[in-house]
Image (cartoon, rainbow, N blue to C red):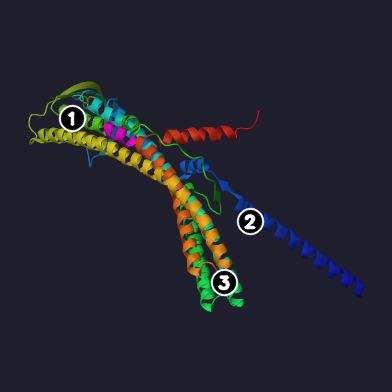
Amino acid sequence: MIKSQKSKVKSQKFLLFLLLTVYCSLLTLSLAFAEERVITMQEAYDLALTTHESIKLAQEDLHQAYTGFDKTLSNILPTVTAEAAHTQYSKDKTSNTSTIQPENSSTLSLKLSQPLYSGGKDKSVRKQARNKIGSFREGLDLAKEDIVYNVSVAYYNLLKAERDMDIKESALKRAEEQTRVAKARFKAGEVAKAIVLRAEAEAAGAGAELARSKAGLDIANTRLARLIGIDGNFKVTPPAPLSAPKDIEKLILTAFDKRKDYIRISIDEEIAKEGVAYAKGNFMPSLKFDGTYSRKDQEPSSSSLNRESIYGTITLTFPFFEGWLRTSEMKEAKSKVRQAELKRLNMKRDIEKDIREAFYNVDAVASTIPPLEKQVLYAEENYKLVFKQFKYGLATNADVVDANSTLISAQKGLSNAVYDLQLAIIELQKKSGVLMEEVENQLSVLSYNKLPDK
């Protein structure tokens, strides 16, 4: 009996151990999978364009523009209305020859109204609605472009944060190595206690810098995750470097053809011109046709009652005076045209200025990279030499600290310049109106690579 109980307890313990082992294995695998998720720049673009709310809002604006265009069709199509009424009187009133007031009466009418002419206002409204579709279509493309640019900035900021983390980790390791050497020399009686304390202070400071860098990495990760609509841990990989355009004048001409905001403001100018055409229609007469079928019945009946009738009416309306309303509307419409022209001209000049600034910025950032690469190379060699001299008492602790600070500064400067150059090129593409074309080409390649092998 005792042996059987012991055997049962051992079986339960073994089963519990087995379950815990399986659970820990699954947990480890899930964590490893979560940590190993890597997102490329193209995948980040695809996720953002698919999930971000601003894209969906712009799509709804376009949908409403199509609906507004459909609504303009009602201005030129006929309308049909039916009306029925029943009247119950307190009592009927009759004379010797006819019924003065029946006990009750019923009427049924069916009316068709068809606008024939409105001074061209219907045509103008329809053109404005069609142009609004084009405007909101450009607005959708503009929203996509803004999201792509924001993703690019967040993506490269995350790469910067990761590189900054690596630099700070290396700096901490160097500070710890410096502390170890300082303690060894102190034990050997070669340096004073102050040298050890200074080294420990530098190591503590490097640890604090690493903690701040970790917080910056988490913030950059969160910002990118918000844009692309994912949760959990992920890593990013540096994309292929972009090449900078060389012909600034060609970029300016390209922008006038492809900048979505410039195309949209040009469409808005056309809408304003159609507003003038609509205002002119207010000075023209309007003509419409009404056709009516009517049926009446009453109790008691009367011999003079016209039970059924069909008739048509043509109505010509011409406004002679309305308190100068039409004149004011015409002046307002023409003012909106001038305003739209000025907006387009202002944007045209701003586009040229923006492209020149972005082009010069690309050139300036690119010119800093070769000197920074040399600075990093020299700073690395300098630190190695100074630290080696410090080991043998040929350099002071301050020399090591100075060499380490120079190395950190050079590494950060080069890292920021490399990624800033890519961001500057992307900004130049955005200013030139070709950013979405570049991204769409990348996404088409990504989609092709995802196709199964035949």
Query: To which residue does mark 3 refer?
Result: 182
Query: Whole-percent x and y of residue 382?
Result: 51, 57
Instruction: Tell me if 6 is positioned left or right of 184 in this view.
Output: right
Label 1 neighbour load within 10 Å: few <14, some 14-19, many 20+: many
Q: Is residue 405 above or below residue 253?
A: below
* Distance Cα–Cα, label 2 vs label 1: 65 Å
Amino acid type at mark 1: Val
Q: Nearer the viewer, mark 2 or mark 1?
A: 2
Residue at the spot of label 1: 276
Amino acid type at mark 3: Ala
The answer to which of marks 2 and 1 sits earlier in the sequence is 2
Q: Is disc 2 placed on a helix, strand or loop?
A: helix
Vertical side of 208 occupied by 223: above or below: above
Q: Position of residue 122 (x, y in %)?
A: 24, 27
Query: Of discs 2 and 3, which sits in the foreground?
Result: 3
Q: Quadrant of residue 331?
A: top left
Q: At which x and y percent is residue 355?
A: 32, 38
Mark 3–mark 1 Cα distance, whole angstroms, equals 84 Å
